[in-house]
Image (cartoon, rainbow, N blue to C red):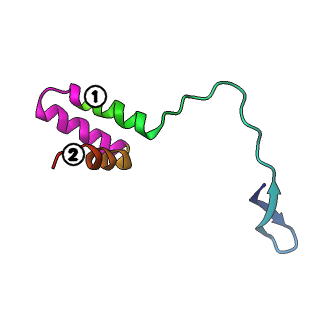
Amino acid sequence: MSIVLSPYWSPDEGIQKLKMEARAKAPAAPGLAPPVFSVKAQLDRTLLQLRSRTSPIEKYTFLAQVKQADVEAFYKLCLEYMSV
């Protein structure tokens, strides 16, 4: 159940008000769902793609794209695979 605010017109006061209604969740849409990969699998794929880049500028732009797309994955990748 979720609570939804529904607008309605109050003819007595001449203004629009909101009332709370409880609604049941909509059933899941039929069909196939996209695959979901674990965080470990995503990091392994990202690391594999990073290692396939040859020049430092390619690696930099790839990491910048990863950081922009998924900040948590970027920092997890840096912390787990960064050589000290």
Q: Image check: 46 left or right of 84? A: right
Vertical side of 14 occupied by 8: above or below: above
Q: Residues within 10 Å of mark 2 (few under 14, many from 20)?
A: few
- Specify the farthest residue to the front: 84
Q: What residue is shown at x 24% (from left), y 35% (from top)?
A: 62
**Among the 4 quarters of the image, the one containing residue 30:** top right
Which residue does the numbered mark 2 point to in the structure image?
A: 82
For image coordinates 78% across by 54% down, the residue present is 1
**Position in image of residue 71 (x %, y %):** 35, 49
Disc 1 residue crowd, few under 14, some 14–19, many 20+, Cα 10 Å: few
- Displayed quadrant of residue 74: top left
Question: Which amino acid is tagged 2?
Answer: Met
**Farthest-out residue, right:** 12
Q: Which residues are magenta?
A: 51-69
Q: Position of residue 5 (x, y in %)?
A: 74, 61
Secondary structure at badge 1 equals helix
Q: Tell whether 80 sits left or right of 8.
A: left
The image shows residue 37 at horizontal and vertical percentages of 49, 33
Question: Picture coordinates of residue 4 (x, y %)?
Answer: 75, 58
Q: Magenta stretch: residue 63 in it?
A: yes
Residue behind mark 1: 49
Q: Earlier in the sequence, mark 2 or mark 1?
A: 1
Name the magenta segment's main secondary structure: helix
Label 1 is placed on what type of residue? Gln
Task: Tell me if residue 82 comes above or below residue 48 in the rendering.
Answer: below
Residue at 14% across / 26% down in the picture? 54
In this figure, what is the number of numbered marks?
Answer: 2
Q: Residue furthest bottom?
A: 13
Name the mark on residue 59.
Answer: none
Kindly identify the residue that appears in the image at 76 percent across and 47 percent down. Answer: 25
